[in-house]
Amino acid sequence: MLRFSFTLAGLCAGLLLSTNVFALSLSDLSQSDATGGLKDALTQGAQVAVKQLGVPGGFSKNEEVRIELPGKLGQIAKKMKMLGMGTQVDQLETSMNQAAEAAVPQAQALLVDAVKKMSVTDAKAILGGGKDSATQYLSSTSREQIRARFLPIVKKSTDQVGLAQKYNAFAGKAAALGALDSKNANLESYVTEQALNGLFEMIAKQEETIRANPAAAATGLAKKVFGAL
């Protein structure tokens, strides 16, 4: 009977300890752990997003980020396809997506560098923020540098397609008439912006997944931090 009492007491103590572990909150974590776990998760999200998008079909076969002609040009393109004149449109849209796929791998080093530079203050704001606050941090700290890295790669890819020049000429006129946003009047600028949007959208999805399911994090520290949110 005495042995049973000790066993029962030990079991109760174990359950109590487990409850305390699972009830861990951010205030129980050191600043170093909180920042380190967040950096691990962000690095993971950036690497996964680049891996998903920076391959053939990464954009073109993903309906969420596939790049199509903008605004009224897109509406015209759809009508051309319905009328059997979609070959040239398909060629242009294919080149747009291929350009984005070729550019995305250049983002990884810049994203990882932005993560490394994250301060404790940044980490606190992110962990206490919304479901995409980490992605917003990456976008605000690295988007301009990534854009500068993407643009020449996208231009080189789109220049190989004769329709790129025609797009710029036509889109420029459309923008002048108010039928198209001026920021979309240049093909390489438009594709670059869409590539950036797609990249950060995929990073946000990774962040959302880890916040909802900390077990999806790649490191024990990241699991610990996001499990405390």
Image: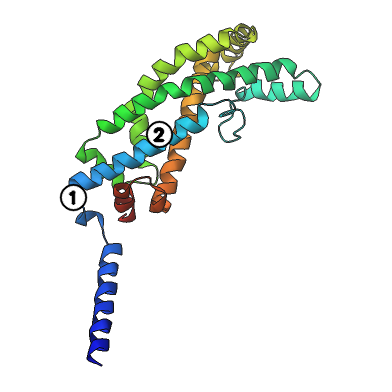
- Looking at the picture, how far across and down is residue 53, in whole percent? 51, 29
Kindly indicate the quadrant of the structure image that contains residue 117.
top left
Q: Which mark is residue 70?
A: none
Quadrant of the frame with the N terminus: bottom left
- Looking at the picture, how far across and down is residue 75, in whole percent? 68, 25
Say if residue 186 shows up in the picture: no
Tell me the residue that label 1 is attached to: 30
Q: CA distance from mark 1 to mark 2?
A: 24 Å
Tell me if mark 2 has few (under 14), some (14-19) or many (20+) residues whose alpha carbon lies within 10 angstroms of its own: many
In this rendering, would 152 be left or right of 225? right
Tell me the residue that label 2 is attached to: 46
Q: Is residue 89 above or below residue 136?
A: above
Q: Residue furthest right?
A: 83
In this rendering, would 79 be left or right of 22? right
Tell me the SS state at disc 2.
helix
In this rendering, would 19 be left or right of 192? left
> For the point 58% across and 22% down, which residue is it?
97
- Looking at the picture, how far across and down is residue 187, in whole percent? 55, 14
Q: Is residue 53 above or below residue 19?
A: above
> For the point 52% across and 19% down, which residue is it?
190
Q: Say which label, 1 or 2, has the lower sequence index.
A: 1
Residue type for callout 2: Ala
Q: Is residue 152 above or below residue 109?
A: above
Q: Residue furthest bottom?
A: 1
In this rendering, would 161 be left or right of 107? right
Tell me the SS state at disc 1.
loop
Quadrant of the frame with the C terminus: bottom left
> For the point 19% across and 44% down, which residue is it?
32
Residue type for callout 1: Ser
Q: Tag count in the figure?
A: 2
> For the point 38% across and 38% down, which residue is it?
44
Say if residue 96 shows up in the picture: yes
